[in-house]
Image: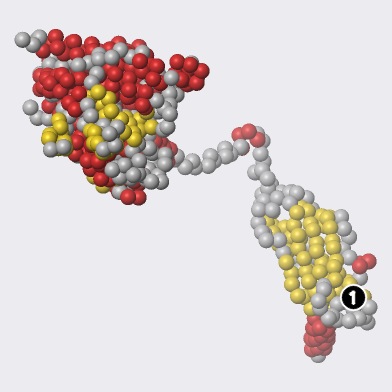
Amino acid sequence: MSPPLDNQLSDWRSHALKLENEVKKVIVGQDKAIRLMNIAIFARGHVLLEGGVGVGKTTLLQSIARCIGGAYERIEGTVDLMPNDLIYHTYLGEDGRPKIDEGPLLRAGENLSVFFFNEINRARPQVHALMLRVMAERHLHAFKREYRLPHMVVFADRNQVEKNETFEIPSAARDRFMMEIPIEVPEDRELRKALMFNVKFQHAENLTKQVESNVLQFDQLNAFSDQLQSFIKSSDAIEEYALDLWDATKSPEKFGIKMDTVDVNRLIHTGASPRGMGMLLKAARVHAWLMNRDRLYPEDIHAVFHELIAHRLVFNSMYENRRTILARELTSHILSTVAVPAQVKAA
Amino acid sequence: MKTQTIKFIAFIALLLTSYAATAQDNEIKTLKVVNPPHSAGIRIGDVLERQIEVQVSAPYQISRQALPLKGSVRDGIELSDIQVDDLKGSQAPGYLIKLRYRVFANAHVPTSMALPAEGFALTGGAKALSIKLPAWQFWFSPLVPAEIKNVKEQLIPQFKPTLVDVVPHQQRLAVLLSLLVIGLAGLLYINADSRWLPFMNGAFARAHRKLKKLPRTQTSEKEALLQLHQAFNSVNGANLFEGDIAGFLSKHPQFSKLRNDIEQFFQRSNQALFGEWHHDSAQFIGELTVLSKRLRDCERRVS
């Protein structure tokens, strides 16, 4: 007999907060990113990481994977990477005969909990297509059998600095990722000094080992996530507010949103998708749960709005090359302009 | 016979006189005589000027040694100055004679007087000719009435000048200036987004006015919250949420003394709008009205 729901919620919350604290022991200045990744884990969403080189993305991921438990796999995106490379690899055995082994995607089977795709935009669109299908369906047919990956969460990193030999992820593919989380160098001077001079940050592998393993039970996350989503309720006012936010991503001009360097009337090609808005509410519910509430507040939506919506917006081509800056600027304007409660509905 | 002889001699004399006069007219040509402009109201001490322009035939010329004597007084009229100038621009000799007289005569009643007739002798010719300037009559006016004994009794009060009635003009000016001032104030008020006057139209003042009028029922609760949220958003310049209160208070320190009340308002608003909060709506709206009044006072910086 399973424990009462209240106890489960409380226990899982303490585990979730412990995961954050464990990761914060080795990753400094990334509290917001850690909280967002925690939310993505409990909302069962895949994450796109955005950030420069050497900011600690891999260490962060390895630490989180260690806390989640289960298997962790990683692949590097390269221009010659083919879909097959995710599924199997061939080699000559000791007996000189060719052999085939399962690739990183299948190697751990159902125990795979975190799959890290480094520099995903260096891989070809064929690889993207396979990866995105697996992300959506969480199973794969290979070697004449069905491989199920029910607990897999994909963290992908895209190189935004270099443009040569890269393949931009199309908007439909970006939409499969629940969040795009920026990993930035900490602004705090003392933290940056520590990152430079504290020798403990020089050995990422040793650093990761300091994190307690198996804080969460990865194979129970799916079931708990469903319970959590059902538990958090939303009022009419918050639903109206979320709808207004959605409309504002499609037609910001209707809400009187103005941006200094952009004609807002011509900025948006496509706003957030229904899947994106569904994921937004899913992540917001996790935030409400982490804040020990059973009701959604606007603050819960705000906590994840930028990371859920910005990468889903499709701008007209003239603005697309400035999308990172403009998307964040637009989402900020939306939150500061769309009022809650916007109006009083007739009872 | 004797009578006829006398008549004949008289006729001849008259004829000769007439000839002599005609002969003088031929030698002297009077071009212009200018007399004083007024011939009445002349008083003691007044200066009168007259002048004559004449042309004489050569070889005659005016005798400057025989001019009327400057300073001579005749019947109370003094010739105070005489000036003879040659006329310019004429072929024959000509003269401009300017005479200046001062009246020293006195009379108690209006009296007819005259600037004396003058003669200016000509020399250089065979005949004894002279330029004749006839006398010029004028009326002398006494300064005081005749037989005056007590000057004070005779004084005639001076008439006050009629004053223009400026009261209607002043009233019109006052009205127009008032309109101008009101108009300028109105323009400033509108230009300042209707918030120029510190005691009018502040966001919380508007919210408080609306909250006071709301019925204390459950259906009005959301409207009351909406009004206060709109006031906060308006003052903040963007949506204000619970997590932004610290930044809001640092930007608007006049509300700092209500920090706890503001935080409590946002917590209760979240509970009322997004959660399940069982409470007395009438009491809650009353508390919101009190809070809006306190916020309005902070906005006006009077508390």
Locate residue B146, reporting x and y percent.
66, 44
Viewer can see residue B76:
yes
Q: Amino acid at mark 1?
A: Gln
Residue A179 in the image: above or below residue B211: below
Residue A130 is left or right of residue A322, and the answer is left
Dot 1: element: strand
Identify the coloring. Answer: secondary structure
Q: Position of residue B289 (x, y in %)?
A: 21, 16
Quarter-of-image position of residue B242? top left
Which residue is tagged 1?
A: B61
Quadrant (top left/top right/bottom left/bottom right) for the C terminus of chain A: top left
Residue A201 point in image, percent of width and height: 44, 18
Q: Nearer the viewer, residue A77 or B183?
A: A77
Q: Residue at x 23, y 29 (%)?
A: A107
Left or right: B118, with A25 as reference point: right
Image point (73%, 51%), residue name: B46
The residue positioned 25% from the left and 23% from the top of the image is: A71
Q: Quadrant of the N terminus of chain A?
A: top left
At horizontal 29% and vertical 37% (from top left) the residue drawn is A96
**Number of numbered tags placed on the structure image:** 1
Quarter holding residue A39: top left
Q: Residue B49 falls in which quadrant of the image? A: bottom right
Left or right of residue B182: residue A229: left
Q: Nearer the viewer, residue B224 or A287?
A: A287
- Determine the chain carrying the residue at label 1: B
- Residue placed furthest toward the bottom: B1
> Against B66, is A263 above or below?
above
- Residue B72 percent location from the top left of the image: 86, 56
Q: Nearer the viewer, residue A260 or A180?
A: A180
Q: Neighbour class for label 1 at 10 Å: few (<14), some, many (≥20)?
A: some
Can residue A309 be seen from the camera position used here? Answer: no
